[in-house]
Amino acid sequence: MNYTDLKAAILANAECQPYVITNDMPKDYDYAAKDAAIAAIFNAEAGTRLVERFENAIGIMSAVGAVTGAEILEKLDQAKAQIPALKWAMLAMVSDTGINLGDHETQQMLDAMVTASVLTQAEADAVKALAIQPSSLAYETVSQPITAADVSIALRNY
């Protein structure tokens, strides 16, 4: 964990200011509760983030439902002859590894399938959502949840 980045983010966050205790401040024996409050602020769900998620055809059918998944895959399979990128994406979909639904270009290709009237917006959104997870300030800052101990280390080196 990058404690320097965490410290900078804590100090820059107005919501954290009432709880910040650094070594150059007067001793505060309520430090544990204040560190926990900062950790809670940073770990609170705040928006979403795109994550790497590889899925093959079976995984998509499992995730969005067998019937819906089959309909989506059938539409994509029928359109692949006219769209070279889709042809190769469909080849990946039948492999064990699958395709990374969290890749920005994959997400854009799904949007393009809506524009081309291959998929409905709801169908594209259902597949895209498989690679979207809740996010937090902690994930945006240090790519993982933080604890009160992490706050203590970041602000006071202990």
Image (cartoon, grey):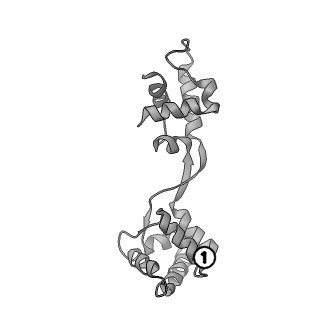
Whether residue 60 is visible: yes
Whether residue 147 is visible: no
- The residue at the point 47 percent across, 66 percent down is 101
Residue 156 sits above or below residue 6 on the image: above
* Rendered location of residue 96, percent (x, y): 35, 71
Residue situated furthest top in the rendering: 26
- The residue at the point 55 percent across, 42 percent down is 137
- The residue at the point 41 percent across, 75 percent down is 93
Label count reads: 1
Quarter occupied by the C terminus:
top left
Residue 32 sits above or below residue 136 on the image: above
Report whether 77 appears left or right of 14.
Answer: left
* Rendered location of residue 20, percent (x, y): 57, 24
Q: Amino acid at mark 1?
A: Val
Q: Can you identify the residue that label 1 sits on?
A: 114
The kind of secondary structure element at disc 1 is helix
Relative to the observer, which residue lies in front, 113 or 63? 113
Residue 73 sits above or below residue 132 on the image: below
- The residue at the point 46 percent across, 31 percent down is 150
* Rendered location of residue 52, percent (x, y): 44, 59
